[in-house]
Image (tube, rainbow, N blue to C red):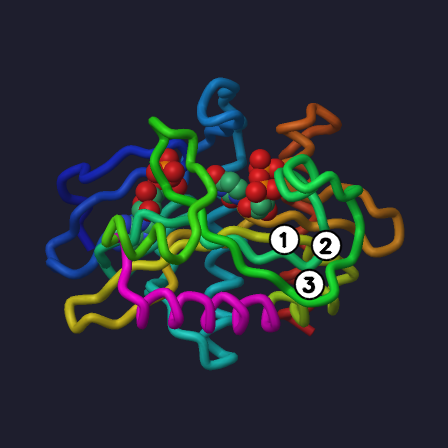
Amino acid sequence: MQKGRLLYEGKAKKLFETEQENVLMVEYLDQATALNGLKKDEIVGKGQLNNQITSLIFKELSAKGIETHFIKKISKDEQLVEKVKMFPLEVVVRNVAAGSFTKRLGISEGSQLAFPIVEFYFKEDRLDDPFINEQQILVLSLATEAEILQMKKIALQVNKALQELFLAVDICLVDFKIEFGKTKTGKVLLADEISPDTCRLWDRSSQAHLDKDVYRREIGDLVPVYQEVCNRLEKRRDQ
Ligand code: ADP
Ligand code: UDP
């Protein structure tokens, strides 16, 4: 598959056209950002690890009957995906209180939530990706009522599948962010990535952070931590 025109360069990935109109090549970058790009570093090895982990997770989801944009991993830092029209929304699922949820609501980090909750954020860098409710999504015509319902339903299915997957490798899935797009036929499809960049993952025995919080909070080195997540998932897959 030929790498065509660069369509988009984001904070963590580049998207390229391919000779197939509905297929994109995604290149995972060795770049970490936090605070909406204010903190930025090159971290050698991060791109390959996120490509590997995302590919493995999307394959697991597909095996569990959840459709995704993922087609296949084609090199250490590249994968092919189905091109979709992204909803400008970040869909966050939380099982345990952490991050912005604790700051906004005054709940201590680590509190188990009575049930998983789904939140939407408006993906708009210039506004710092603010929290948005369902009526606001409708008023801004970011998605229809049916699409919102579908995103919430799939997000909870993904949560269940990921909780099982991570539990099997002694990791607690605290929260995560996913993104959806719309296919040509109007189907809501899980897209983007699922990696330690987009999930909060805590070791079940030590409670150690195995995710991007080591970078955000400057409490450790990112690559060994992502490698640990990758190793555990690969070991489980190969058993
Ligand atoms: P950001 O845009 O937040 O800086 P990235 O660097 O991860 O993030 O860029 C990847 C971009 O690709 C994101 O804007 C995401 O919404 C978009 N994207 C992910 N999957 C697809 C897809 N299948 N089709 C089209 N765009 C996608
Ligand atoms: N997240 C993400 N991208 C973002 C914002 C959040 O992947 O732009 C993920 C984050 O890694 C965490 C979850 O979404 O797993 C919830 O993040 P939160 O709202 O607590 O925000 P943060 O603590 O990152 O400010």
Amino acid at circle 3: Phe
Residue 47, visible in the rendered structure:
no
- Of label 2 and label 1, which has the lower sequence position? 2
Q: Decide if residue 176 is on the left or right side of residue 135.
A: right
For label 3, the SS is: helix
Q: Residue at x 76, y 43 (%)?
A: 107
- Of label 1 and label 3, which has the lower sequence position? 3
Cα distance in 3D space between marks 2 and 3: 14 Å
Instruction: Tell me whether circle 1 and circle 3 mark residues in contact (CB < 8 Å).
Output: no
Q: Where in the figure is residue 79, as x and y percent of width and height? A: 35, 53
Mark 3 and ligand 2: say if the CB distance to the nearest ligand atom is below 8 Å: no
Q: Residue at x 26, y 43 (%)?
A: 15
Q: Which residue carries the number 3 mark?
A: 166
Q: Is residue 151 magenta?
A: yes
Helix, strand or loop for the magenta stretch, by majority: helix
Magenta residues? 142-161
Cα distance in 3D space between marks 2 and 1: 7 Å
| Quadrant showing the C terminus | bottom right
For label 1, the SS is: strand
Q: Quadrant of ligand 1?
A: top left
